[in-house]
Amino acid sequence: MAELVPIAEVVKAVGLRGEVKLYPLLDFHAPLLESRFLYWEDGEPARFESAREQAGGVVVKPVGSDDRDAAEGLVGRELGFRRPDYAAADFP
């Protein structure tokens, strides 16, 4: 897998519906969360149903994370871009 450049880390589960809080590792804007180039550190594409800013981070609902248990399973994961994707004409 190509080298991942992390932009955020999942720091905690939020609520009961599968949401998690992302802690930004660099200055990024919410529209980055809609990029088709986002991946988890294991190479799985990262897609989100929703996102909202919240004190020092962003709360997101990852596709497939539908309850508290699923959200807790994401804690500690990193989110980022693969280094080769930076050369794509439509990045991010």
Image (cartoon, rainbow, N blue to C red):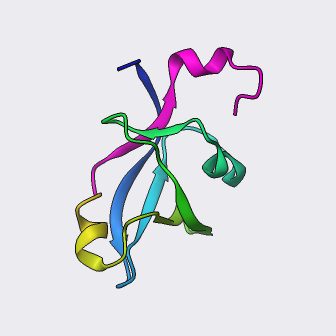
Query: For the magenta stretch, what is the residue range?
Result: 75-92
- Quick one: quadrant of the N terminus? top left
Q: Is residue 56 visible?
A: no
Image: 10 above or below 28:
below
Q: Is residue 18 magenta?
A: no
Q: Which residue is at the far bottom?
A: 16
Give the left or right position of residue 68, taking residue 14 as reference.
Answer: left
Give the left or right position of residue 18, taking residue 61 as reference.
Answer: left
Residue 10 position within the rendered picture, expressed as x and y whole percent measured from the top left: 37, 54
Residue 16 position within the rendered picture, expressed as x and y whole percent measured from the top left: 35, 85
Image: 82 above or below 23:
above
Q: Which residue is at the far right?
A: 89
Q: Is residue 9 visible?
A: yes
The residue positioned 61% from the left and 41% from the top of the image is 36
The residue positioned 28% from the left and 78% from the top of the image is 68
The residue positioned 29% from the left and 58% from the top of the image is 74
Image: 43 above or below 85:
below
- Quick one: quadrant of the C terminus? top right
Locate residue 69: give its quadrant: bottom left
